[in-house]
Image (cartoon, coloured by chain):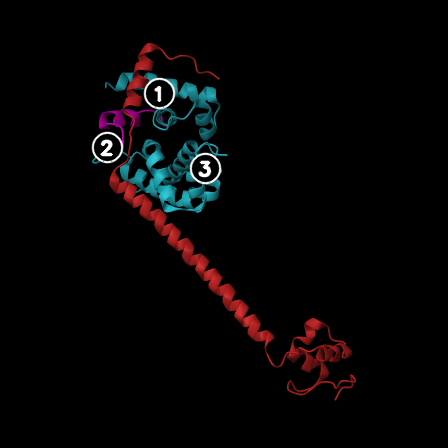
Chain colours: A cyan, B red
Amino acid sequence: MTHESPAPVRGLAEGRPEAFAELYDRHAAAMFAVARAICGRRADAEDAMQQTFVELYQSRQALARAHSLRAYVCRAVRNTALRARARPAPQSLEFEPSSAPPAEFDSELQQALQALPQEQREALVLKTQAELSFEELGELLGISPNTAASRYRYALEKLRHTWKP
Amino acid sequence: MNESPLEPELLELEAQLLGQRAQATAPQLRARVLLAVERAQRAERRVWLSSVAAMLLALLLLRGSAHDKSAPHSAAERADFAALGLSPAESKHWSLIAQRAELPMWAPLVDQSGAVR
């Protein structure tokens, strides 16, 4: 059973647009950070967001039964982003400067994140952006909570040398 | 679980990262995503309406078939066909009955005594 209050969850199960708007407002920023950490390019991350929300709507009964909505939607967008990344893309995955600032980390931090190994970047973004616990993080990534904590720590240590706020 | 405390420098960095946490996405992305959800909802409704329409059509066709004048209805008619050794399912199919009785489809098959005319 989800930790969310019953009314929004019922709205999601019934497929009400306002419930999905609320879901977006609560979790989209974290989801987008996850998508961006995996896809690299903003446009690809936006496509992943759109695809994820359509799929969440189509499987809304499972969504409404999720133990933690935030962990569930972050897992969903991660899976979509990984699928998108696996497809051959005509464009390179190089860092693309942000043109719409309010959505994410500043561009220097974004560059520093892109320089991290994929698994450390995911751990860092999921922990700091999606605010997942190490248990949730481990479950989402298919690793133990200890490994999740280690990846997070390594990511912080590397980032300390490459990003100066 | 290994959540050993981070060193002060890492804790400070973590705090700065948390401070950088995005609170919202670009409004254009929000509009685009929610529009896609609405489209998915409309597409789902169209599929649902199509399946309901197909089901209603099938019911109408079945009802029309049941009202087919060539299909037997009355108890007497059912008894007549039973006398011919035809199951109820078979008796509903006038063409099969006619074929087995070697009678034209429009011909009355049996009289009330069960004798083949």
Magenta residue check for A93: no
Residue for point 30% across, 28% down: A114
Residue type, label 2: Pro
Q: Position of residue B63 (x, y in %)?
A: 57, 72
Alpha carbon of mark 2 to alpha carbon of mark 1: how far?
Answer: 24 Å
Nearest to the observer: residue B51 or residue A77: B51
The disc placed on residue A155 is 1
Report which quarter residue A161 is drawn in: top left
Residue for point 33% across, 10% down: B8
Q: Which residues are magenta?
A: A102-118
Q: Upstream in the sequence, badge 3 or badge 2?
A: 3
Alpha carbon of mark 1 to alpha carbon of mark 3: how far?
Answer: 37 Å
Depicted A159 relative to depicted A17: above or below? above
* Element class at badge 3: helix
Which dot, 3 or 2, sits closer to the camera? Answer: 3
The disc placed on residue A6 is 3
Alpha carbon of mark 3 to alpha carbon of mark 2: how far?
Answer: 31 Å
Q: Upstream in the sequence, badge 1 or badge 3?
A: 3
SS majority, magenta: helix
**Farthest residue toward the top?**
B8
Q: Position of residue A99 (x, y in %)?
A: 20, 36
Nearest to the observer: residue A118 or residue A69: A69
Residue at the disc numbered 2 = A102
Q: Chain of mark 1?
A: A
Quadrant containing the C terminus of chain A in the rendered view: top left
Q: Position of residue B14 (x, y in %)?
A: 32, 18
Residue type, label 1: Ala
